[in-house]
Image (cartoon, helix red, strand yellow):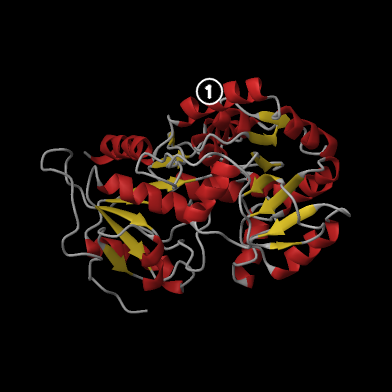
Amino acid sequence: MSFSDQPASESAPVPSEGAVPRKRVFVDARWTRTDFPDGISRYGAGIIEALHRIRPVTMLIHDTRQLRLLPSGVPHRLINSPFSPRELWLSRTLHRLGAEVVFSPLQVIGGFRRRYALVLTLHDLIYYRDPRPPGFLPLPVRIAWWLFHHAWWPQRVLLNRADAVVTVSETTKHLIERHRLTARPVTVVPNAPGTGGSDGSVERDGEAPGVAETAGEVSSGSGTGERRELLYMGSFMPYKNVATLLAGMSRLPGYRLQLLSRIPPERERELREAVPEGVEVVFRNGVEEREYRRLLRGAAALVTASRDEGFGLPVIEAMNAGTPVVCSDIPIFREVSGGQAWFFDPESPAGFAAAVRRTENVESRDSVVAAARAHAAGFGWDSSARKLSELISRLVD
């Protein structure tokens, strides 16, 4: 892979003079997915765009296709893939580029004998409870991933290489402290919605809420007549526990479940076999942001039965849209929702169905939804970027 010093835009906007000291800050965007954005991709893109409005940053990429999913107008540098042997000497590259601060939206980054300040991110500890790696990773990386998550000490080694550590929630910060994963200071820089305007709010265009039109294939049932739409947005990893949602749908006649995210064909076949007789489930296999917003506006609820999460961004997106949230009763969802949701035991399909039914009470639903929108207004990329910028200032300014 050749190196390039070409910026993404020669006219990239930068913060006003005197706003903050102009240290050379690089953000590692090489984990940005080129097929569709996952949670890490969206976190990186969101924090880059907002941070660049406060202090100038430069993105590190390894594939120009990543620029499609990253903010325009932010300078970039093309360097090696994080999977390349050249990653061992990444610090040399960054020294040559003049880096004074490097922020990674993951805890994995190469290079030794660095002279720049390093800030790493640990989103969650999910894979210590379920160490099965994401399928898109190369086989050697999946093997290393599985081994890595069978002991705490490798994580400690990674995090203690940094000058500071970032995580996205108080829940994860407490877990990091409980397991003594780092001696470095831990700062919470929350995730934030990516739909709508720069403050993360979902635009409302005056449409009356109703039943969302669907375009996916219905896996069972007639598909005729009005249906109340339940939306699921998220991956289909085992800890996401989508099977509980499918099982609970048998107790919810009149409702239809839409699975919005991309799904591998083999996983889709498994889940289709788990759909109860007479239940309507739509496998959308990915939706665009505009369509996602439209579906949220017309949905009866956003639902998730996840057993574990690092943040749960769809919860905030639904709350911003004024859509009820029905979610598993786990600490991170209590934190992110501020308690303004309908909770259930993630191992109970009956509990899931009962929670959905409780949203049908108009008076209580309106009260919870209003409180949820007020709580969700506190999450935004500008606020998160300010916290990261303050951390950087404490390190180097």
Q: Is residue 18 shown left or right of residue 384?
A: left
Camera sees residue 312 = no
Residue at 16%, 41% in the rendered image: 21
Question: Residue at coordinates 61% horizontally, 62% vertically from top-left?
Answer: 262
Q: Quadrant of residue 17?
A: top left
Residue drawn at x 43%, y 30% as measured from the top left: 377
Q: Nearer the viewer, residue 85 or 309?
A: 309
Amino acid at circle 1:
Ala
On-image quarter of the C terminus: top left
Q: Residue furthest front?
A: 225
- Residue at 32 percent of width and 59 percent of height: 59
The quarter of the image holding the N terminus is bottom left
Above or below, comparing residue 146 to residue 209 in the picture: below
Q: Is residue 294 left or right of residue 196?
A: right
Counting from the top left corner in percent of width and height, residue 71 is at 33, 57
Residue that numbered label 1 is attached to: 371
Assess disc 1: are there few (<14), some (14-19) or many (≥20) residues with their C-alpha within 10 Å of its C-alpha: some
Please determine whether, in this image, residue 304 is positioned above or below residue 137.
above
241 relative to 140 in the view: left or right = right
Q: Position of residue 23 (x, y in %)?
A: 20, 48
For residue 143, what is the image quadrant? bottom right
- Observer-nearest of 30 and 379: 379
Q: Is residue 242 above or below residue 390?
A: below
Residue 70: x %, y % from top left: 37, 59
